[in-house]
Amino acid sequence: MSADAAPQLELWQFRYAMYPEKARWALDYKRIPHVRRSVLPGPHVAQLLPRFRYKSTPILVSDGQVVKGSANVIDYLEQQFPEPALYPTDPAQRTRALELQTWFDDAGGHVRRAYFRDFLLAGGYAADILSTGYPALVRRIYRAAFPATQMIMKLDMMITDRGADEGLRRTQEALDIVVKNRGPSGYLVGDRFSVADLTAATVLAAVAFPPEYPVSFPQPLPAALERWLARWSGHPGVEWVREMYRRHRGHSVAAEDRNG
């Protein structure tokens, strides 16, 4: 199916989150027109759970079909919009790319746990990032209520010191795997961009803050985020993340990005 002939897709997302970014990037990479429905972390549960019986993002809706989770979204897009492909054509390379996607998807939860321990310390600044794109009044209310949202997020993501410390270890491991597996072309599998690179770069975007990421971070950064970035700044995997974003992130092809 060509993007021009396809029905318009609807992506339910957080504007700032790794797995929605993975789905957004796939849609943009394939130049598939779509509408984005952005929800606020915390209040999103009341919007998504009754509608989809699911409270996580991303969720892709197409002709009444509901696809939940970033790996499933990419698989659906590969079937419906095969070019440009994110799955390698060579069977062995495809198997390897999907293995790496699974590994990095699993690592993502740990990376997120470590990152959000520091990110949430930024308080109102973090609230402003999470509410990007919302009207000023909504953002002020969200900021005022953010201490309660912080508590909910910590419980939901199981952010404890022990869990976050394990997340630091997994983040280091993820960066090491990138460096170990990148080939002469810079890609993790074969000589072209694939779902493996997309997933790894998205999961590790939090250690690199690539300029091409759709949500920007106003300067100066809070001290907690400066410390977080400094922890990883010397690792060559950080530059790999930035290079993947430079090469392949591109511009949004969303027909509309409206608040859910």
Image: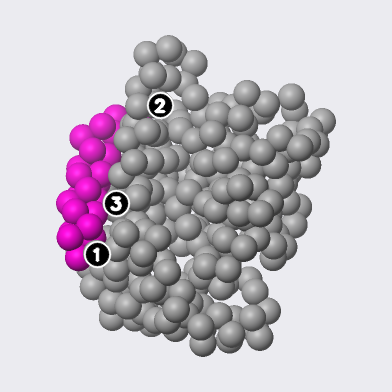
Where, quadrant-wise, is the N terminus in this rendering? top right
Magenta-colored segment: predominant secondary structure: helix
Q: Is residue 179 above or below residue 146?
A: above
Residue 141 image position (x, y, % from top left):
59, 85
Q: Could you give the CA–CA distance between mark 1 and mark 2, rounded to whole angstroms? A: 30 Å
Q: Is residue 156 above or below residue 98?
A: below
Q: Is residue 139 above or below residue 111?
A: below
Residue 219 image position (x, y, % from top left):
42, 80
Three-letter amino acid code of the residue under disc 2: Leu
Q: Relative to 130, is 186 on the left or the right?
A: left
**Observer able to see residue 27:** yes
Camera-side residue of 250 and 177: 177
Secondary element at tag 1: loop
Secondary element at tag 3: helix
Q: Residue at x 39, y 54 (%)?
A: 205
Residue linked to disc 3: 110
Secondary element at tag 2: helix
Magenta stretch: give its range: 161-185
Q: Residue 183 lies in magenta, yes or no?
A: yes
Residue linked to disc 2: 98
Q: Relative to 187, is 255 on the left or the right?
A: right
Residue 157 image position (x, y, % from top left):
36, 59
Which quadrant holds residue 210?
bottom left
Q: Residue at x 45, y 40 (%)?
A: 198
Q: Residue 49 lies in magenta, yes or no?
A: no
